[in-house]
Amino acid sequence: MSNAPKLHNAMWPGLVGKGTDPGQEPPISLERMLDLTAQAEVRAQKFEGIDYFLFLPHTDPSASDSDLRQIADLIQSKGFKVGSLVAPVWPGTVGDSAMGDSAAREKFLQAVRVACRIAKIFNEHGVRQYGVIRIDSAEFGVEKWRADAKANTTKIAQTFREAALIAADHGERLAAEGEICWAGMHSWKDMLNLLEEVGMPESLGFQADLAHTYLYLLGYNASDCALIHEGYSEDEFYAAYEKMTDKLRPWTIDFHVAQNDGHVHGAGSHDKTGKHCPADDPNGKLDIVRCAGYWLKDAQKRGIKHICWDGCMFPNKTLETVSTWNTILDVMLKVREAHGWSA
């Protein structure tokens, strides 16, 4: 029976799209997200770790070494490892746009330094033994990028190269998350162009998410890159899926299991992006297990040691329901049973 990749849950669904503004749901604390994850159990199997967002209210990015070790102790006390970390690269956190002016780009790089510092503390503690640091272009929407697409992609690539050098100096790898809301990363083709322009596969790769990459197929923010259209057949879908994954899989070093219903969704300050759905959503467009296999082919050779569920912007009621996590864990186990390995 396969025991790898390890099965992780993400902590950021308790934060992303949440807030204190009118109409927003409140954030869910780290402690509560950990407890909800720890409660899940399917066929005597539990989640083995978490992926972690490095910003308030879960984490003060300027927290002391001692405070960060206490967080590591808390996570470890629930029986979890820490895997991939999400660097706070966006305006309003530590960072700013990777295609902005020199001051904005320096903020972006500082966010990567912050993530590397926290990673080092978690690594030395022992709670973290694998995983990457996740980034994106931190430029919401594609209109500004389109004003000079080639020059703006080059600017993002330059920022990413500098960030990758910082990460490499700390023994870390960066994974750029493909998502339709991030400028220069909003289609499979533009994402591939950016990765190739950075040209540092040993230090910067791709983070694939099943929900987001489904929108890539539809060309939601880049109609010229669409590989399927409404009314597609199953054969057309998988032919397109294979084409996309064959291009992006060699770069993929981090992987999110997810479901999508073909719609986009935004909440709070987060721009509209691929809508994550519950694993058993009747409107889900993906055969999760089959689609995961396209990304996990040769995953060991690319250094992947865990996979993570992403339920970003789920309503709090859904997140607070025990059956939500058992259903997710069940799907994660099926993915591992079909495509995993013994480690």
Image: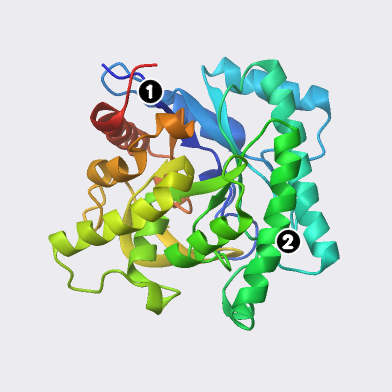
Q: Residues within 10 Å of mark 1 (few under 14, many from 20)?
A: some
SS class of the residue under badge 2?
A: loop
In the rendered image, the quadrant that contains the N terminus is: top left
Report the disc number at residue 4.
1
x and y percent of residue 112 in the render? Answer: 73, 45
The residue at 57%/75% (across/down) is 142
x and y percent of residue 152 in the render? Answer: 66, 72
- Side of 259 relative to 72 (left or right): left
* In the foreground, 225 or 19: 225
Image position of 24 with respect to 5: above or below? below
- Side of 270 relative to 89 (left or right): left
Residue 95 sits in quarter: bottom right
* In the foreground, 120 or 275: 120
- Side of 153 relative to 206 (left or right): right
Image position of 221 with respect to 81: above or below? below
The residue at 21%/54% (across/down) is 282
Q: Is residue 249 visible?
A: yes
Report the disc number at residue 126.
none
- Side of 292 relative to 316 (left or right): left
x and y percent of residue 186 in the render? Answer: 50, 66
* In the foreground, 305 or 161: 161
Image position of 88 with respect to 145: above or below? above
The residue at 57%/52% (across/down) is 16
Snapshot colouring: rainbow
* In the foreground, 194 or 275: 194
Residue located beneath label 2 in the image: 91
Q: Closer to the observer: label 1 or label 2? A: 1
The single residue placed furthest to the bottom in the displayed view is 147
Q: Residues within 10 Å of mark 2 (few under 14, many from 20)?
A: some
